[in-house]
Each structure stands twice: as C-alpha cells, then as structure tokens.
C-alpha cells in the first residue's frame, strides 16, 4: 500500500507533544497505524521532547497531578480490555483501538452517503465519525469553518487530480475548497475528525445547507 498524503509536521509534532484535542488525536493515530514514515517522525519528535524535559530543572507538581495521571491511565486500560463493538469485517481498515469505542447508528446524509458517529471516551471539541460514500459519488464543493481531518480506511476518492486511497490523510479548513469524487469499484470509507461547520458552495450547496448536519 503506497501512502502519498500525510499530516503536516506541525500536526505530528502536536500529537507527539500531546497538545491535540482528543478527536484530532484519534485521527492522527489512525493515520499512524498505517504509515511507517509518520510513525518514525513522531518517535523522533518524542525523543527530542524527552531530551528537552530531561534538561529542565525539577519543579513541584500540583496537588492533583498524581490523581489526574492515574485517571488517564485507568481509562485506556478499561477500553483495551473490552470486547470490540465493531468487527473488522463490518468496517474494514478501522484500527483496533477505534473498534473498542461506542458508535451511533448509520445516518443518511445524501444519496449514497451515510455517516456514523463515534462516541469518544474523553471530551473533545472535535467530532469524529465514519463517512461512507458509494462508488462514483460526487460531493458538493465545500470548505470548513474549522479544521477537518480525513483518513481513508478503504476504497478511494480523487480530488484536484490527486488520488487518496487507504492510509492517506487529507486536511481542510476555510481556505480550501474540497470537491472529492469517489472512485468506481467500491464504497469509500473514511474516518473524519471535524471541528466547526461544513460550508457548502454553489447554488445547490446553499439550497442543501439547512439539511446537512455533520
């Protein structure tokens, strides 16, 4: 599998430093499962961060620091030991750690386009969901009022002459207009982490805007 599209270095550095919110963390982690290049970069950033921390003078911890760390350690352990709520054959390409989360039901968005919310175990300003689009689907031109991260799990889409297949990562915001077209042959299934609102363009987009809720 050839992965051609990756998160930029600032996002990977934010992941390594733990500064992304939980929904964004899930999206980057999903890409890292498939991408050895980005895993290597992230490990390098973690080593750099470790070296910086080792050179700092010791500082007193806050009174609730230990309890906060213990709470974060307990929650992932409980998720890891649970039975997956989604089987691999039901959603191919979904990382194992995501399959342990809770999911809402599939919702119809448009002809051949469905959404399934992912219920995150920690609070996040970023919504995370699965987006499934049928072969040949042409999405309406759109942008985003906040940051949107898309990880392709299976199938593929094309956009601005570029091909996005399993493992590829795409990012959008209010400066980028997306016009994805799902390639023929199979459904395209993506994990999407979105902050802000979808902004549809064109006369048809303006007509559809009140009915689209992501």
Image (cartoon, grey):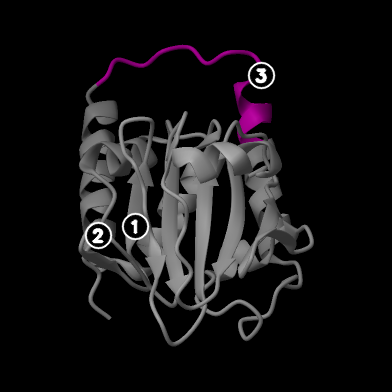
Q: Nearer the viewer, residue 142 or 31?
A: 142
Q: Residue at x 28, y 81 (%)?
A: 1
Mark pair 3, 1: CA separation: 37 Å
Q: Which comes before the other along the chain, label 3 or label 2?
A: 2
3 or 2: mark nearer the eye? 2
Secondary structure state at the residue bearing disc 3: loop
3 or 1: mark nearer the eye? 1
Question: Is residue 138 shown to the viewer in this render?
Answer: yes
Residues under numbered marks 2 and 1 in contact, where contact means CB atoms less than 8 Å apart = yes
Q: Which residue is mark 2?
A: 5
Asked if the stretch drawn in magenta spans residue 65, the answer is yes
Q: In the rendered structure, which segment of residues is drawn in magenta?
A: 56-70
Mark pair 3, 2: CA separation: 41 Å
Q: Which residue is mark 1?
A: 169
Query: Tag on residue 64?
Result: 3
**Looking at the magenta stretch, what is its main secondary structure?**
loop
Q: Position of residue 64 (x, y in %)?
A: 66, 19
Asked if the stretch drawn in magenta spans residue 45, the answer is no
Would residue 57 appear left or right of 18 to someone viewing this image?
A: left
Q: Position of residue 169 (x, y in %)?
A: 34, 57
Q: Residue at x 65, y 44 (%)?
A: 212
Would residue 161 appear left or right of 69 to someone viewing this image?
A: left
Q: Is residue 77 above or below residue 65?
A: below
Q: Residue at x 60, y 22 (%)?
A: 65
Q: Nearer the viewer, residue 152 or 74?
A: 152
Secondary structure state at the residue bearing disc 2: loop
Q: Which comes before the other along the chain, label 3 or label 1?
A: 3
**Residue 106, quarter of the rendered image:** bottom right
Q: Is residue 44 above or below residue 17?
A: below
């Amino acid at each position: 599998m050839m992965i051609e599209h990756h998160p930029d270095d600032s996002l990977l550095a934010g992941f390594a430093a733990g500064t992304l919110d939980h929904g964004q963390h899930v999206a980057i982690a999903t890409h890292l499962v498939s991408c050895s290049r980005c895993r290597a970069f992230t490990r390098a950033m973690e080593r750099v961060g470790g070296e910086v921390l080792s050179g700092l003078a010791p500082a007193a911890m806050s009174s609730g620091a230990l309890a906060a760390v213990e709470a974060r350690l307990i929650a992932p352990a409980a998720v890891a030991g649970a039975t997956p709520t989604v089987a691999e054959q039901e959603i191919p390409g979904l990382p194992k750690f995501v399959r342990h989360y809770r999911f809402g039901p599939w919702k119809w968005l448009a002809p051949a386009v469905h959404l399934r919310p992912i219920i995150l175990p920690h609070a996040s300003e970023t919504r995370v969901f699965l987006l499934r689009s049928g072969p040949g689907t042409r999405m309406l031109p759109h942008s985003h009022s906040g940051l949107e991260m898309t990880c392709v799990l299976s199938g593929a889409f094309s956009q601005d002459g570029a091909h996005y297949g399993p493992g590829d990562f795409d990012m959008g915001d209010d400066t980028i207009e997306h016009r994805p077209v799902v390639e023929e042959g199979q459904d395209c299934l993506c994990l999407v982490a979105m902050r802000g609102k979808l902004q549809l363009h064109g006369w048809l987009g303006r007509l559809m805007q009140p009915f689209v809720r992501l």
